[in-house]
Image (cartoon, coloured by chain):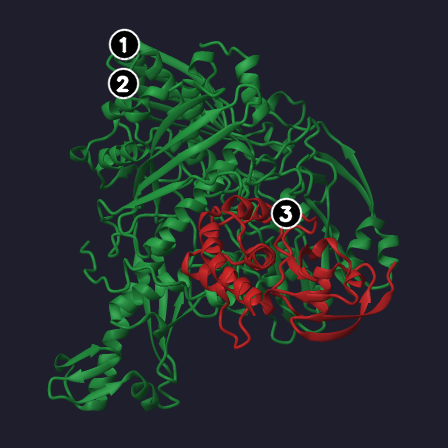
Chain colours: A red, B green
Amino acid sequence: MSRKVDITLTVNGQPHAHAADTRTTFADFLRDDLRLTGTHVGCEHGVCGACTVIVDGEAVRSCLMLAPQADGATVVTIEGLSEPDGSLGPLQRAFRKHHALQCGFCTPGILTTAHALLTQEPDASEERIREVLSGNICRCTGYVTIIQAILEAREGYRHAANASTAS
Amino acid sequence: MKPLGIDKLIGASPERIEDQRFLTGQGQYVADLDIPGALHAAILRSPVAHGRVAALGLDAARALPGVHAIITASDIPNPIPTIPLRLVPLPEFDPYLQPVIAAEKVRYVGEPLAVIVAESRAIAEDALDLIEIDIESLPAVGDENVDEAGAFLFEETGTNVALRFHARSGDPDKAFAEAAYTRKETFRSHRHTAAPMETRGLLAQWDESGQKLKLFGAAKVPYFNRRALSRMMNLPEENLDLIEVDVGGGFGVRGEFYPEDFLIPFAAQRVGRPVKWIEDRREHLMATNHSRDVGATVEIACARDGTITGLRGDVFGDMGAYIRTNGGVVPTAAGMFLQGPYRIPNVDVTVLALMTNKTPVGTYRGPGRFEANFFRERLFDMAAADLKIDPAEFRRTNLIREDELPYSIGKRAPHLPEAVYDTGDYHAAFERCLAEIDWQGKAAIQGKLIDGRYHGVGVASFVESGGAGPKETSRFVLEKDGSITVATGSSLLGQGLETTLAQIAGDVLGLPLTAFRIDHRSTARLADGLGSYHGRSIIVGGSAVVDGAEKFRAAVIEAAANLLGRPNSELRFEDGVVRSEAGASISLADIAASRSAEDGLLAVDGIFLVNKPTYSYGTHAAHVAVDPDTGRVEVLDYVAVEDVGRAINPMIVSGQAIGALVQGLGGVFLDHLIYDDQCQLLTASFADYLMPTATDFPSLRSVAMELRLSPTNPLGAKSAGEGGMVPVAAAIGNAVGAALRSRGAEPRTLPLSPPRIWKLIHEEKECTQ
């Protein structure tokens, strides 16, 4: 039924070596084994997007991935999205300012999805943002303020991209 | 009642206090809790809609390593407890209450048959698959002809009609006999539900020596649930602590008393270890309350100028298999809100509650209203079209004028007194909405085919009750460090109450938001609390905070008077300091530090009593384009206008309105719980149960007006959380009807999915009765 395999991975900059149950989803591994409970599980079948984390730069549904598949990966979760000094990052600040969250349950998956998108595509249009975000269900906000917040935070990602190109 | 007249924080939109933890992954939802030694539960649910339980084969499951216990009906002391009614407690419903576990009979797919407790959730779910279920099927009762299905859900009652209620005002028979014009139509709203992003979950911790229970995962109405559970477990209420951690959305369905709210504590008591149960999404869609399954035949009587002289109708609610805590609200509210904000002197409404072999229903944001508004406003547009009157003009003629308020519609629900609309300017909200959508400017495109799509603009007005009494409580505690904790009987489900209640307390006491910590976690903090539903947590909960804050100020001044040796009359509390006229002062921290161990903390209780609801109201308008080739409807523009009395935090009010609106649009176009003819649920995943996403409805606006304060409460607030939802099907239905008028297609049945709209255009030429 189940057996364990040893995996190593980096989560939010911290290296981890762990024996992972072969039938455990990566979402459950993050939550139960690493106690990173900011990643939420809303449907367990890959539709709602609440469990989205960033694996090697890509936004991934951690409920559709098994823990052993994360062997060797570099992972960012909601707990790793703030600035190094612990203050809120540009997306988080914009979400707060625009009231882009209510109950907060879908928020980690939406932030990680938007972070991966804007990191890869700092010039993403509103249409592109809506398209990518359409894989994340929010039942509280109606999305209007979420899109406003991401559009505002996009400026910060553009500056960062320009700065890294210039240097 | 006099409004507060303070407005430093009230009316401002500070960023929410709760957001910091939600944005950094530090929120704490029930699934995030970890108690060492906890076991995990999974629920065996009936795969059959209606049948007699012959046997459950448990041996293989019991033998699975890691399984600690399997609990079935035979393990629970007789009589097996039933879930009590929280609202609409009519004796007619008594035979239809849900037992906490199925014994001889199952009545819906998803009904609990057994609880498996195991080392891990995975093992518990493995064990589920090993149980052999032997159920003899009975005919499933599925459609509204419930007494023709060949089976009674509860044989002893001899009917599947649980309630028949009749309300009447004026002389409707005469009005219809004398009417120049009448029209009768049949409408249907479809079964769907709230589907909050967090499923339900519970973590029960039993202390055998103290006979005490801690139950994490409470929401919405923890104090009612504590009372219900204490009776079922035969324990004093004070031995139970129901703890509310962060809740991932409620919208009516989360937090009501469900079978698991007994089964999980019972399991923890039985195995002597903490037991954790987290509902999965499939379970959620078949076990958590459904709603909106309401139909009606409604008839209108008018003069030729559009003046309504009568309204009559039969409204039924498909209740599912049991009457749960608040199920009766759905059909009775649909009957009550059929009249809406209109002057209708002669009304006759019959309400039926029908039992079927489907998941039981409960309240979902705007219960009964979403449905009733669709029925009425659609009928109004059909009548206006027959009489060749502009739909806006038709409503202007019939909307209640301010000089007619307060306006009684009479007694319309079996459990409520006469309903009296209180204050408002219904015409002002209506005209504002028409101006926002540019009703006159868009008259030219009504029903026009433009670039292959039919355009239509629809309008719908509503009135909405909120702020249910009879009371709410609060408790202000001056902590040792001089900070203030405010315990509230209201419940937090993501609606921002940590911020808005602090805004209210801050304005009464002249303190900043950061001076307060809002405490809602434990039922040990207050003697009682009514919780959050019916738009009541600001109106009633916030008013209890006003009372608590005023008493807190008096208590602080009293304490300072003793310490400073000055009479109360010479003291004032400002900026967190009590000052005397002579210049002496003492801070909250000093007052806190002065208290001895015998004194304990300085604490006062606040309470707000109210026996009347508030009535918010407003108008929605939508501009849609309908593609006749695909049946797809695009919402090009949507405006929601509501008078909320007073907006404590306009940013949050707007968030509530837009959020409700999109949920409502989901209900119009997407969300649908579909059953087959054996009452098997076909939409038990998010791949099948569709909800709005970010690409669906980008063009939405809400306008919160503060036209007339509510007279029921010191804040002047009316409900603001449900009005965004109430007339959505009505406004969209009318817009689609206007778009398709040349095709003779009138939406009468929800959802307005592409296949249904396509059929409406191309196949069904529904005849007018």
Q: Which mark is residue B178?
A: 1
Amino acid type indicated by mark 2: Thr
As drawn, B536 above or below B24 = above
Q: Position of residue A8 (x, y in %)?
A: 78, 71
A127 on left or right of B439: right
Whole-Å distance between the Cαs marked 2 and 1?
Answer: 9 Å
Question: Label 2 is found on which chain of the structure?
Answer: B
Q: Nearer the viewer, residue B658 or B644?
A: B658
Residues marked 2 and 1, same chain = yes
First along the sequence among labels 3 and 1: 1
Q: Amino acid at mark 3?
A: His
Q: Name the residue rendered at 44%, 44% in the picture.
A: B660
Task: Report if residue B493 is visible in the image.
Answer: no
| Residue underneath mark 3 | B284
Q: CA distance from mark 3 to mark 2?
A: 45 Å
Q: Secondary structure at mark 1?
A: helix
